[in-house]
Image (tube, rainbow, N blue to C red):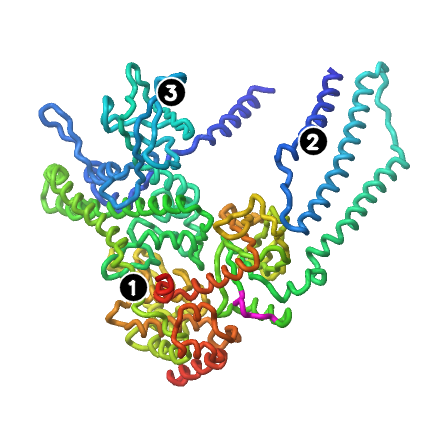
């Protein structure tokens, strides 16, 4: 019976390792490739941590298995004995993990800074926001500045964010951005906390009541499976990643990245639609 | 483990398993139905010549025409796209063995609707008029599995069949996923979450929808396009979110199902109205006080149910079909007679004068400053059903809910923010609510556009929110006259102040 339990506890880590080993190939729960340059760096961090964790997991399981097996096969009939432990061993298993954590903390700083610290944002994105994205229960409302509106400074952008303008363009659940260059949106929420999450771009940012948070990302021109000819661009699902109420699951929308020219056309069309008076555009069609 | 523990864990296991069975969905009856005497609700069974015959009351008639959520009926009298697929029984390949409840079919034209659980009606050959339930369909081979076994001969190749209602049923499934928890199984705006929402979710049963594009004098109905627009865009300022990502066929199916629920609710009201006069609990009580025997009244009801009720119900159904067809008619669509007046300070000033005038009466509800706090919101209204004063002051919609006139300073427009949408709100009104329709005679097109320009400028009055100077591309494309584009290049900040000054002095504040 002793051996049974020993084998039982050794069996499960082996199953876990096999499943982990085959899952990338089976396309189970590993993220597919990222469609943004920063996302690729975030993926590198993810895989680095995964390797560290894998080595630690395998090591501890082998150790555990060895100890169990040794105990199970031991012929001696010794009683358990009390030990104060090993001081040097404790120092080791404190310092080594601390060192690893410190390494991860320092190693990821660069990516974090690129993504989160304004001073490191790609040039000119802060004063040329694509849109303001407002989360609300349970949808995403998008407000684009008029294409001719040029912001001189960040203060100018803040002024625009504080007050809606008559020439703003509005849509819902459909965020369009030009592809192949860094773009920035300002994220806010109308009610409770939400989270803007584009899995394929590895973008995730909470929308916090009272804050207007700049989020930048870049969608690569390579569209692959996301290509949607009807939308003249590539389409990525984005959703709310913070349980925000009973309709949380409804907060699914699409982000469409289009080549610059198509994006301009879209904004022009949006503007025509926004000024729709039911008469003028009919003439156009005829 | 003691007996008690075993027993408790057994109960816990049973509890977890019982939760897995989905409850069966049912349409709820309108409150008005319960005002009728039970016989009028449920019908009367009569014995004549040793035979029992049942004459349906309101509930039976209604369910007979619309079915239950799990067994919907496609009542072809109604202008609903229930979905209809026709096809032919095909030859079975010689080398394939199939079961007694299977045969091959070929559809006319393309077929990508889900047809599992739908019913199939054979309308030619040996099994003419046989209805079969589809349990499985293999789209690649065309092999159909049904819920009946054919012992001797199967439907022969070449027999025609028809499947009806697949769009409606698809709509029901989608409705159950996306809409039910607010709008309720019956479409009565009473789903599980409805209680916590303000404004309340729409109750479809009156057949009224607030934001429509149909002429209010010819129809009170809504077009399919109106419903689609609301589902796609959501209703800002309410809990109705946007369902933009629904595919076109999904959207169509949901719209048809919503119309179906709406028609069911209207028909239910109609049926109650037919019997309410003589056979409501109150009416019967007063008749009995007047000395009439209850058995007399029941006899009377039976005679009504046998003939007049059916005739009246058929009339009502015709009216119902006409009501919805009228909305789809091109002539019902409200389109402005002329393009939007350029958004000039003069136009806004004229709009403001109209807004304040006794002709348009906007201030009665929306208030002088557009805050939605006009004097009407302090009045006690009379409830049209009871003829008593409402308990709370303010405006009520046809559903009896307290509604606030729109605060025009927020820039949130529930029915849409395009100039066309605002134009239609003024021309069409908000059906079921107190916003009246200013038809062609009250306000001219020019006047409505002036009002639109003014209303759209209210959120920016006196605020530093200047539009970008320069011509707007959309204006260029529409090919307005030179004069119009010139006015666009004016500095709007200045012009807004002018408007404010003009209106301020005009009012003498």
Q: Is A68 on the left or on the right of B87, as rendered?
A: right
| Chain under numbered label 2 | A
Residue at point 88%, 32% (across, down): A84
Query: In this figure, which residue is indicated by the disc labeled 3?
Result: B93
Q: Which residues are magenta?
A: A145-151
Residue A57 spot, x, y in % from top left: 76, 33
Residue B239 spot, x, y in % from top left: 44, 54
Q: Nearer the viewer, residue B240 or B387?
A: B240
Residue A239 visible in image: no
Q: Is A182 on the left or on the right of A276, as rendered?
A: right
Query: In this figure, which residue is indicated by the disc labeled 1?
Result: B381
Q: Where, by quadrant of the figure, is residue B362 drawn?
A: bottom left
Q: Nearer the viewer, residue B404 or B211?
A: B211
Q: Quadrant of the N terminus of chain A?
A: top right
Residue A44 spot, x, y in % from top left: 72, 45
| Chain under numbered label 3 | B
Residue at point 15%, 26% (across, down): B52
Q: Magenta stretch containing residue B187, yes or no?
A: no
**Alpha-carbon distance for marks 1 and 3?**
73 Å
Tell me whether circle 1 and circle 2 mark residues in contact (CB < 8 Å).
no
Asked which secondary structure carries label 3, the reply is loop
> Which of the two labelled residues, at mark 1 and mark 3, occupies the earlier sequence position?
3
């Amino acid at each position: 019976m002793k051996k049974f339990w020993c084998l039982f506890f050794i069996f499960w880590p082996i199953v876990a390792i096999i499943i982990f080993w085959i899952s990338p190939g089976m396309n189970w729960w590993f993220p597919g490739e990222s469609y943004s340059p920063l996302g690729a760096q975030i993926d590198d961090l993810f895989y680095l941590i995964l390797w560290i964790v894998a080595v630690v997991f395998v090591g501890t399981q082998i150790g555990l298995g060895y100890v169990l097996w040794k105990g199970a096969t031991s012929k001696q009939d010794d009683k358990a004995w009390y030990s104060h432990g090993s001081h040097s061993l404790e120092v080791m298993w404190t310092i080594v993990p601390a060192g690893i954590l410190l390494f991860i903390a320092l190693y990821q700083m660069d990516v974090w800074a690129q993504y989160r610290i304004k001073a490191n944002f790609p040039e000119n994105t802060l004063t040329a926001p694509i849109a303001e994205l407002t989360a609300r229960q349970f949808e995403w409302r998008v407000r684009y500045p008029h294409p001719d509106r040029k912001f001189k400074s960040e203060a100018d952008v803040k002024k625009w964010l504080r007050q809606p303008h008559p020439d703003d363009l509005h849509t819902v659940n459909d965020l369009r951005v030009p592809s192949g260059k860094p773009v920035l949106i300002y994220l806010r929420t109308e009610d409770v906390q939400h989270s803007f999450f584009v899995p394929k771009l590895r973008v995730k940012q909470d929308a916090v009541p009272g804050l207007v948070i700049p989020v930048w990302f870049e969608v690569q021109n390579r569209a692959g499976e996301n290509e949607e000819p009807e939308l003249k661009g590539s389409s990525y699902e984005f959703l709310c990643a913070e349980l925000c109420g009973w309709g949380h699951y409804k907060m699914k929308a699409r982000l469409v990245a289009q080549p610059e020219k198509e994006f301009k056309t879209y904004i022009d069309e949006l503007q025509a639609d926004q000024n729709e008076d039911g008469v003028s555009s009919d003439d156009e069609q005829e | 483990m003691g007996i008690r523990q075993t027993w408790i864990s057994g109960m816990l296991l049973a509890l977890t398993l019982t939760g897995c069975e989905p409850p069966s969905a049912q349409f709820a009856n309108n409150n008005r139905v319960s005002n009728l005497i039970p016989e009028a609700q449920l019908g009367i069974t009569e014995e004549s010549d040793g035979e029992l015959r049942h004459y349906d009351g309101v509930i039976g008639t209604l369910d007979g025409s619309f079915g239950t959520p799990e067994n919907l009926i496609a009542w072809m009298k109604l202008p609903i796209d229930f979905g209809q697929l026709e096809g032919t029984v095909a030859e079975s390949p010689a080398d394939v063995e199939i079961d007694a409840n299977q045969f091959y079919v070929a559809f006319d034209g393309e077929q990508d609707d889900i047809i599992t659980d739908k019913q199939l009606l054979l309308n030619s050959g040996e099994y003419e008029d046989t209805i079969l339930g589809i349990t499985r369909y293999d789209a690649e081979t065309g092999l159909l599995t049904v819920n009946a076994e054919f012992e001797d001969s199967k439907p022969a190749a070449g027999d025609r069949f028809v499947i009806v209602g697949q769009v409606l049923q698809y709509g029901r499934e989608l409705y159950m996923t996306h809409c039910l928890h607010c709008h309720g199984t019956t479409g009565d705006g009473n789903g599980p979450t409805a209680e916590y929402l303000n404004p309340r979710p729409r109750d479809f049963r009156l057949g009224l929808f607030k934001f429509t594009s149909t002429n209010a004098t010819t129809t009170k109905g809504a077009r399919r396009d109106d419903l689609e627009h609301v589902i796609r865009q959501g209703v800002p300022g309410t809990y109705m979110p946007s369902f933009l990502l629904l595919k076109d066929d999904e959207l169509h199916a949901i719209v048809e199902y919503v119309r179906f629920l709406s028609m069911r609710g209207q028909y239910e009201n109609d049926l109650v109205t037919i019997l309410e006069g003589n056979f409501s609990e109150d009416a019967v009580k007063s008749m009995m006080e007047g000395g009439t025997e209850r058995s007399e009244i029941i006899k009377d009801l039976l005679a009504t149910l046998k003939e007049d009720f059916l005739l009246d119900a058929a009339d009502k159904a015709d009216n119902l079909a006409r009501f919805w067809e009228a909305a789809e008619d091109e002539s019902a669509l409200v389109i402005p007679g002329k393009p939007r007046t350029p958004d000039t300070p003069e136009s806004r000033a004229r709009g403001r004068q109209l807004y304040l005038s006794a002709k348009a009466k906007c201030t009665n509800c929306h208030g002088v400053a557009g805050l939605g706090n006009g004097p009407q919101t302090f009045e006690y209204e009379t409830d049209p059903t009871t003829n008593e004063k409402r308990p709370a002051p303010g405006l009520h919609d046809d559903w009896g809910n307290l509604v606030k006139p729109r605060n025009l300073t927020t820039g949130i427009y529930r029915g849409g923010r395009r100039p066309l949408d605002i134009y239609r709100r003024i021309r069409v009104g908000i059906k079921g609510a107190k916003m009246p329709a200013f038809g062609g005679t009250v306000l001219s097109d020019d006047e409505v556009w002036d009002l639109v320009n003014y209303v759209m400028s209210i959120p920016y009055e006196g605020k530093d929110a200047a539009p970008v100077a320069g011509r707007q591309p959309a204006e260029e494309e529409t090919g307005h006259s030179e004069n119009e584009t010139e006015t666009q290049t004016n500095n709007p900040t200045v012009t807004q102040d002018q408007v404010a000054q003009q209106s301020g002095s005009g009012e003498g504040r």
